[in-house]
Every structure is written in C-alpha cells, then in structure tokens.
Amino acid sequence: MLVERARSGGLQLTGQGGLLQQLAKRALESALEGEITDHLGYEKHDAGGRGSGNSRNGSRAKTVLTDVGPVEVKVPRDTSGTFEPQIVRKRQRRLTGVDEMVLSLSAKGLTHGEIAAHLAEVYGAQVSKQTICTITDKVMDGMAEWQSRPLDRVYPVLFVDAINVKIRDGQVANRPIYVVMAVTVDGTRDILGIWAGDGGEGAKYWLHVFTELKNRGLNDVLMLVCDGLKGLPEAVEVVWPRTIVQTCVVHLLRNSFRYAARQDWDKVAKALKPVYTAPSEDGATERFLQFQEAWGKKYPAIVKLWSDAWAEFVRFLSFDVEIRKVICSTNAIESVNARIRGHFPNEAAALKCIYMALMSLDPTGKGRKRWTMRWKAPLNAFQIAFEGRLSPSNN
C-alpha cells in the first residue's frame, strides 16, 4: 500500500513522513503486537481470551529515534501491567542502530555538537549532547574489559607512541596518551592498551605500565621501539631483561629538523641517511663523525640529540635488513593520530575517544592482510636472530 502511494502520490523515500519512516513504524508496531499476543496467549479479538485474567488495554504513543529518523509508534498495554516489550523496551528512546551510528561518528573524530547537528540535518532528529555523551559512555565497560584481557606469552615487537591531546581540566594543557601496539608471532597487529600521562613520565611510570602487561601474561618481548621516552629503558630492563629497546629513527630525524633552518632540511636529511643505513655500528659511528664535522658548528643541538640517543639507536644495525625495515620507526601506530582531534573536558573523555578510534581502525580488514604479508619475512629473520624464542609452543 505504501509503495503504491509512493508511486501515485510522490511519497518521498526518506525524511519526515517518508516511506522508510512509515515502513519502520508499521514493522515496529507489528512486532509489538506479536509480542503482546505471545505474552497474553491469544490473538486480538479472540474469544479464547475471555476470562483469562489479563487482556489488552489499549496503547500508548511514544517516539523512538531510529536510523531513518524519529518514528512514533503505538505500544500496546495489558490490564495487569505485566507486559514488558522487548523490541521497544520501556523508557527506551533509541533503537540500537542509532547508538551504533553515534559511536561510529564519535570514533571518526566528530565532536558531540557535530554529531547532534548531523543527526538533525540528515535524519531530522533532535539528540542532545548529553544523550550522545550517555551513548558513548557505554563503551567504557568494554574498554575496561579490553584493557585487562589476557595477552600472548611472547611478542616479537612492541611499539610505544604518544598521542598528544588537549585536555580542559582546570586549564587547557597538552597531555600524552600512550598507545602500546604489538606484532604477534603470526604477524598480526594487536593494540595492547592505552595509558594517560602528564608529560613528565619516568621509570616508575613505565614500570607500572610494563608490569601491568606482564601480569596479563606477557612474559617476553624481543624488541621494543619508542621515541626516546625518559625512564623507559630502565623499566624494560626490570620487567623484560632480554628485551632490546630501539629508538625510532624517524622520530630522531623529525626532532633533528626542529633545530635546523628550513632551507637546510634536505641537506641535513641527506647527511644523516648514511648514519642510519650503515652496515654496522662502526660504520654508523664513522658516518656520524663526518656529519658532526660538517654540521656540528652550525647545529650542535642535532649532534647532541643523536649522541644522547646513540645507545638505543645503534642496536638495530646488528640485525638483518628485513628486521631493520620494520623496527626503525613507530609509524605503525601513528595513523591513529589523524583520527583524534579537538579538546576534551577530562582525561576519561580523551581515553574514551581514542579507544573508539582504535576499535574502528581497518573496518574492511584490508590493512590487516597487508600488515600480515609485510611481516612474513621479518618474522623469519626474528626466529633466527633470537634463537627460537618465537616458537609456536611458547605462544
């Protein structure tokens, strides 16, 4: 009937009073009628219901928000008041699809105000910022469970990187949220957890983070890649004594450019490349001395930067080229940075947003496939270089 009306009278498909809204209304009301029939045990107007002790008692109208917009439905009632509808529960104002839509938009970095405006513009639905906040708060229980889930016994590589966000807690301040990502023995990617910091983290902080990971079952890490975080190598030494801590080469290069004039960036990059592509530590040392001689007077801060990071920088030079290619950078988790924007009222709100962004990464699974293929050769090299610590029986 609705389709015929659409054909003859030009009934619109979407929007207020459109075909999809009317279909949603009829589908919901039919389902509710089926629920009360099942609850009472007899069909509407069925004589078999006489004297049963309970009967239909009219209906009440309520508006629910669906993914095709707000829909007004008539919810049937019974005389005894024992009917508990399931498809549209008591006090429920949103169907599941709307909650999923809000979570998806939030995970893509939209603010609560932008989500509210989007729902109003596209679906004609008025949803308050507080309601959106309530919906997104539901993920916190899942986040707590995710953050404490058991881990594998061994991982070839851990990457540790910081996402800097602005938090309005008293006054606006830049705060780091640390993401720890692992590569599994099968070559897949796994985010192990997220932790908030204040920017002044030291060995005690990292000892807490790594002990937490160890208590979740992580007993061995072959290599850990990070951006020269203070106190981190000392904490790793305590928790996983055999783990090699590697400074991210890409971060070293970026930090070098901070001390160089823009017109010298290409020259500095060209002069530093022989250092991190050297065949051995001795070769890297020789190339670095050449860089120091050429640029040390003009940019002593760059020389100091590399000298301070040297112990954690040169370690990857003793490994096969396949290992070098995948552990010289934390770029593997930096794509998350692009998904996070805006200011957050507090630390919990920032963690919630980053968690949702992480959970929505790679929805098609194509990135996972590319990642796994990329890691096949390095994992074989790890197996040889680390004397069987990655054998499946240890996982």
Image (cartoon, rainbow, N blue to C red):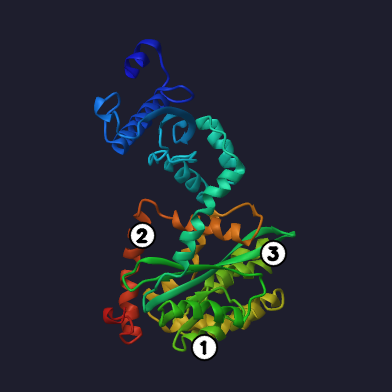
Q: Residue at x 50, y 40 (%)?
A: 91
Q: Nearer the viewer, mark 1 or mark 3?
A: 1
Looking at the picture, tell me which residue is in the foreground, 65 or 223.
65
Q: In the rendered structure, are the residues bearing label 2 and label 1 in contact, judged by CB atoms less than 8 Å apart?
A: no
* Residue 286 visible somewhere in the drawing: no
Judge whether 362 appears above or below 93 on screen: below
Judge whether 191 appears above or below 14 on screen: below
Whole-percent x and y of residue 339?
A: 53, 53
Q: Indicate the amino acid at tag 3.
A: Ala
Question: Would you identify the image quadrant in which residue 6 lies?
Answer: top left
The local secondary structure at tag 3 comes to loop
Which residue position is annotated with label 3? 261
Q: CA distance from mark 2 to mark 3?
A: 39 Å
Judge whether 74 appears above or below 262 on screen: above
Q: Indicate the amino acid at tag 2.
A: Arg
> What is the residue that sits farthest to the front in this orientation?
51
Position of 298 with respect to 62 (left or right) is right
Position of 171 with respect to 35 (left or right) is right
Q: Residue at x 25, y 25 (%)?
A: 47
The local secondary structure at tag 1 comes to helix
| Numbered label attached to residue 368 | 2
Q: Residue at x 57, y 83 (%)?
A: 310
Q: Residue at x 27, y 81 (%)?
A: 393
| Numbered label attached to residue 238 | 1
First of labels 2, 3 by sequence position: 3
Q: In the rendered structure, are the residues bearing label 2 and label 3 in contact, judged by CB atoms less than 8 Å apart?
A: no
